[in-house]
Image (cartoon, rainbow, N blue to C red):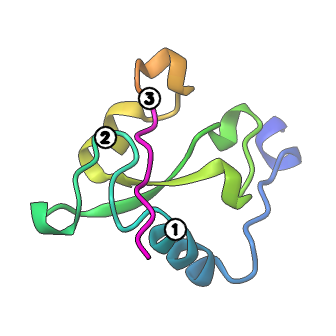
């Protein structure tokens, strides 16, 4: 079975990883720019999907609102016609 052979290993502390990514991105969707004041549900998204060789590295993870994440699904950014919004760093 191919699925059993290609088991994806999740990081030990996925909870802490999620919060690091959310904080890094300012709790804003990296695709549409919506933030906490927009009454949205945030999710963690893989830029390169796990099914296409992506990993759980912080560089491959971004904050995404539920709507954008569902729209992207299991595709690469170029296929989904999405672009990453730059995050404004606050002092």
In primary-sequence order, the first of circles 3 and 2 is 2
- Of labels 1 and 2, the one closer to you: 1
Residue 80 x, y percent position in the rendering: 43, 21
Image quadrant assignment for residue 25 = bottom left
How far apart in space, not on screen, are marks 1 and 2 (Cα)?
18 Å
Q: Which mark is residue 83?
A: 3
Q: Is residue 18 magenta?
A: no
Q: Residue at x 41, y 26 (%)?
A: 82
- Of residues 73 and 84, the one nearer the viewer is 84
Q: Badge 3 local density, few (<14 within 10 Å), some, or many (20+)?
A: few
Residue 37 x, y percent position in the rendering: 12, 67
Image quadrant assignment for residue 47 = top right
How far apart in space, not on screen, are marks 1 and 3 (Cα)?
18 Å
Quadrant the N terminus occupies: top right
Residue beneath disc 2:
68
Tell me where the magenta segment starts and ends, as one range. 83-91
In the image, residue 40 sits, relative to residue 20, either above or below, namely above
- The residue furthest right is 5
Q: Is residue 90 magenta?
A: yes
In the image, residue 16 sits, relative to residue 21, either above or below, namely below
In the image, residue 70 sits, relative to residue 11, either above or below, namely above
Q: Residue at x 36, y 40 (%)?
A: 31
Residue 12 x, y percent position in the rendering: 75, 81
Please identify the dominant SS of the magenta region: loop
How far apart in space, not on screen, are marks 3 and 2 (Cα)?
11 Å
Q: Is residue 41 left or right of residue 21?
A: left
- Of residues 2 and 20, the one nearer the viewer is 20
Residue beneath disc 1:
24
Under circle 3, the secondary element is: loop
- Of residues 53 and 8, the one nearer the viewer is 53
Under circle 2, the secondary element is: helix
């Amino acid at each position: 079975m191919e699925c059993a052979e290609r088991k994806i290993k999740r990081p030990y502390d996925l909870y802490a990883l999620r919060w690091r990514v959310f904080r890094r991105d300012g709790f804003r969707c990296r695709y549409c720019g919506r933030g906490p004041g927009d009454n949205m549900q945030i999710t963690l998204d893989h830029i390169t999907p796990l099914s296409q060789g992506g990993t759980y590295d912080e560089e491959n993870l971004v904050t995404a609102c539920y709507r954008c994440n569902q729209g992207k699904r299991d595709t690469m950014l170029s296929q989904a016609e999405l672009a990453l919004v730059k995050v404004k760093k606050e002092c």
